[in-house]
Amino acid sequence: MIKTINIENGPTLYLYSNKRRHSTFFQIVTKFGGMTKDFISNNKEYHIQDGVAHILEHYVVENNKRGNFLNLLGDMQMYTNASTSLFHTDYYFEAIENYLDGIEIMLNGIYSVEFNKEKLEKLKEPIYQEIRGKMNSKYYHSSITEMINLFHGTTFRNVGGSLDEVRNTTIDDIKLCYETFYQPTNQIIFIGGNFNEEETVSFIKNFYKKLNHKKIDFELIKNKEYDTVVKKEEIVEFPTEQDSVKISFKINASKFSNREKLDYDFYLSYFYKMFFLNSSKLYKKLVKEKVITGSIMGNCMFFDDYFIFSVEAYTDYKDKFIDGVLKTIKDLDDFNEETFELEKKDTIISFILRDDNIMNMLIPFISNVLEFNYPYMDKISDIENMTYDGFVNSIKKLDFSNYNITIITNKK
């Protein structure tokens, strides 16, 4: 059972106590990510470039009064890391013992950042290397092209930013975003596993009671978005052994409830496996006709009130693959109740298996909170209660008419 506690002048706290576990998982989330670029802070409008949230993540870890707190936690034999995604930045650890010491180290590090231009420039060097590594990947370039062509209202392209964007990020940019977004009331804390609930809540409440953190009023600027795509098709010239084609469908999900969005997270996964994976009619047809020789890859993410559902394959017959996918989506006549029931069983098994690890238990819950604003722990009964007719009707409600095609090919 999840408990929710609102800390005065602090973050929302979610607790999942499980004494059968031998470890404790702690994660603090700041609602500032790669897409958080346009905002008003202290009545002044700002438009920052890509990569700032990611740079700030590294800067917070390394440049605070406690030193590199991930190294400190690692020295205490804790598994720990940090990451930046589209809408948030996460710092977390898992500890078998001394978890309160871990919480104290991480929180004190996060709230004692020191700003120094020379330290920022030094920190950029490994980030340059990280970006250069990604630039050697065709998927890096195709994903940026996909974002450019799908969305009208956002200038976001990449969480990590480009070399020039990182190079041009100043210490003032970093300080502005830290002071605006790293406020306790803009953060969420998740704790799960074997911990003393009363002692832990008391410790966190006392920490924030003593914390002297400047409050800044801010507001995110929401740019208008359209259901249509910016561009229907684009070719990315990049070294590749075989051309690949990715078709990305932009589906408006703004009218769905938070619970419905969560259900679609499962439904679209089932839909991909049923219609495009190796046992599907389309896959067998394309293999028989030698249009493809490998699998049809698929992905679904929730982005700015839209589901982005994509399928991709390597092929020398781009038009045949595109026609096959679009016809399959248009007809929607490959529903299979037996496959649906098998997918439900696989999901239930995955729920049972993830019970062995506290991180695996909490991460789906954290995802539900952050992606769908729905603080709910997935249950086996939720999957058992899903019906085939409900699945079919839900997929048929979706509008697949807006899509973009990204083709990766060698230079002519």
Image (cartoon, grey):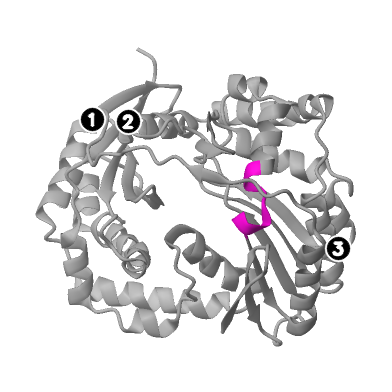
Horizontal side of residue 105 vs 328, given as left or right: right
Q: Does residue 129 appear in this view?
A: no
Q: Which residues are magenta?
A: 180-187
Q: How many numbered discs?
A: 3
Q: Position of residue 365 (x, y in %)?
A: 52, 69
Query: Within 10 angstroms of label 2, few (less than 14), some, or many (20 or more) residues?
Result: many
User: Which label belongs to residue 232?
Assistant: 1
Check disc 2 and report its element: helix, strand or loop.
helix
| In contact (CB < 8 Å): disc 1 and disc 2 | yes
Mark closest to the chain's N terminus, 1 or 2: 2
Pick the quarter of the image with the C terminus.
top left
Amino acid of disc 3: Gln
Residue ID at (77%, 29%): 120
Say which quarter of the image contains residue 333: bottom left
Question: Is residue 173 or residue 317 the one in the foreground?
Answer: 173
Mark closest to the chain's N terminus, 1 or 3: 3
Residue labelled with disc 3: 77
